[in-house]
Amino acid sequence: MEPMAPRTKIFTEVDYEKNGKQVGYLYMPHSVTRSAYGNLAFPIAVVKNGTGPTIFLMAGNHGDEYEGQIALCKLIQTLDPARVQGRIIVMTAANLPAAMNSARVSPIDQGNLNRAFPGDPNGTPTQQIAWYIDQVIYPMAQYHHDLHSGGSSLDYRPFVSMRKTNNPDLDARTMAALKAFGAPDALVWAYSHDVGFAATAAIARGVVALGGEFGGCGSVSRTGVAIVEQGLRRLLAHTGIMEADRNVPPPQPTRLWEVAGRDYYVLAPDAGLFEHAVSLGDQVEAGQLCGHVHFVDNPGRPPVPVHFARAGMVICRRHLGRVERGDCVVHLATEWRG
Ligand SMILES: [Zn+2]
């Protein structure tokens, strides 16, 4: 029924090789007091027709990032297998417990799926679903899109993104897909200070992997949903899996940005209330004021300023007012250098 699923405990009624549209579940044994032989049921859709490439579309990797979750639900409703050449695999809530809890991480294991790859077949639920995606789904895919936003704590100027690798051929094919998606802004992650990303696991398997941040503040951005919906249609046409949708306008020229170092990130220097001094989209200079931390429980203490270490464009801002020392309050992007 399913391809080789090394050591995974996850099972499904969905047949990845069957033509047509199936909307079903990945079942993960989860034995708890209220359900001794229970399972977590992660939604999955497979739309297949004939031979052609496979694209794996994923949202809800972080549960409180909604634009992609909504856009993929709408996509599943409208997909007609007769208009597909190849295969589209969709997960609308990749970390289901997190998505149902409107949280970044799973309430069951505090697992952050986008730091959990390549996962563990006998680990926590978050580690198990990462393992399944990496071992079963990524090997079937030539294309991948992992849809994010800023979640509860951050606000993003929407962009589609890719990760720079040391594989020039894969980077060139990914850049072509990035441009085909046609978002007004696109970003190349040329630097990362963390590990365990879904995209990193996909890239390791040679998959053309896109990502993106399409809003934030724990809300649903209309602009973000529209960028995702139109972009996915263009991406599906780019892969050859579907014909171009006549209702989708051709892409605007994409502005290319990059994040290329740790100094793009501004961290809160103290705990308190953070007052921003800049807005999304602002161009800033090195040394410019980013904001102040205020101490409402000790108003005799002067506020602590924090300044930008480098120039750039404000592409992300912390949404929540209260900060702990080390929280990211802003990160910058600069024009892509190629
Ligand atoms: Zn995310």
Image: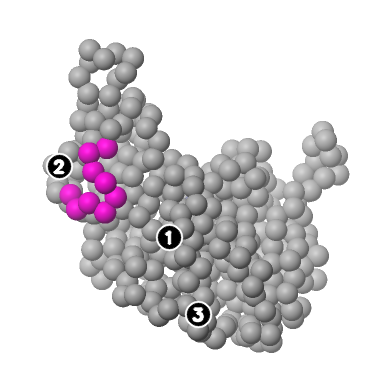
Residue 107: image quadrant is top right
Determine which residue is flagged by label 1.
223
Span shown in magenta: 276-284
Q: Is residue 123 visible?
A: no
Q: Tag 1, which secondary structure?
A: helix
Above or below, comparing residue 71 to residue 327 in the picture = below
Pointer 1 or 2: first along the chain: 1
Determine which residue is flagged by label 3.
247
Pointer 3 or 2: first along the chain: 3
Q: Tag 3, which secondary structure?
A: loop
| Three-letter amino acid code of the residue under disc 3 | Asn
| Three-letter amino acid code of the residue under disc 1 | Thr
Left or right, 253 with respect to 177, comes to left
The residue sitting at 49% across, 44% down in the picture is 218
Viewer-nearest of labels 3 and 2? 3
Structural crowding at the residue carrying mark 3, measured as other residues with C-alpha within 10 Å and reported as few (<14), some (14–19) or many (≥20): few
Left or right, 3 with respect to 140, comes to right
Determine which residue is flagged by label 2.
288
Q: Tag 2, which secondary structure?
A: loop
Above or below, comparing residue 9 to residue 175 in the picture = above
Q: Are marks 1 and 2 in contact (CB under 8 Å)?
A: no
Q: Is residue 15 visible?
A: yes
Structural crowding at the residue carrying mark 1, measured as other residues with C-alpha within 10 Å and reported as few (<14), some (14–19) or many (≥20): few
